[in-house]
Image: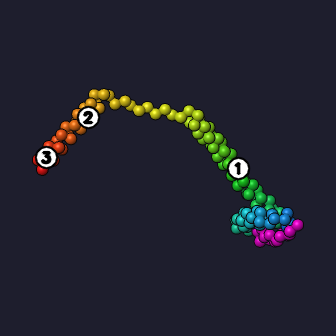
Amino acid sequence: MPELKITIGGRDFDVACQEGEEHFLRSAAAMLDAEARVLLGQIGRIPEPRMLLMSGLMLADKAAGIEDQLREAKNRLGELQAKIDELQANPPQIEVPVVPAEVTDTLAEIAARAEALADRVEDEA
């Protein structure tokens, strides 16, 4: 079982961990150390147990906030997935308006006149 020396709040600790978990321990120790340094910067020298307790509570508060955000994100994801499923099950119907026959007849007549005019201009040129 590997033993690591970690530093939290300027104090060294020897800690054992499972094989292959060293990276996680170092990462957790770095987070705890960051909180301890904030405390030391605000309060100054405090007893080791109190520093560790307060640092741990600060991290727990951050973790609780992140858990709340994660829960909200999961709920929102569920709502959005339900909307997607609904849209896939019942795709929206798109109505294409029908152009009245008189409009298409008028456009055809205008096109014929334009072609005739173009032919006349071409012949005169």
Question: Mark 1 or mark 3: which is in front?
Answer: 3
First in sequence, mark 1 or 3: give its number.
1
Q: Mark 1: which amino acid? A: Glu
Q: For mark 2, give the secondary structure.
A: helix
Task: Find out whether residue 13 is within the magenta segment.
Answer: yes
Q: Which residue is mark 1?
A: 67
**CA–CA distance in space, label 2 to label 3:** 23 Å
Q: For mark 3, give the secondary structure.
A: helix
Count all numbered tags in the image, as a single digit.
Answer: 3
Q: Mark 3: which amino acid? A: Asp
Q: Which residue is mark 2?
A: 108
| Residue depicted at 26% across the width and 34% down the height | 108
Disc 2 and disc 3 in contact, CB within 8 angstroms: no
Q: Quadrant of residue 49?
A: bottom right
Crowd band around label 3 with a 10 angstrom C-alpha radius: few (<14), some (14–19), many (20+): few
Image x and y of residue 100, in percent: 32, 28
Highlighted magenta segment, given as a residue range: 1-14
Q: Which residue is mark 3?
A: 123
First in sequence, mark 2 or 1: give its number.
1
| Residue depicted at 75% across the width and 64% down the height | 27
Q: Quadrant of residue 26?
A: bottom right
Image x and y of residue 64, in percent: 72, 51
Crowd band around label 1 with a 10 angstrom C-alpha radius: few (<14), some (14–19), many (20+): few
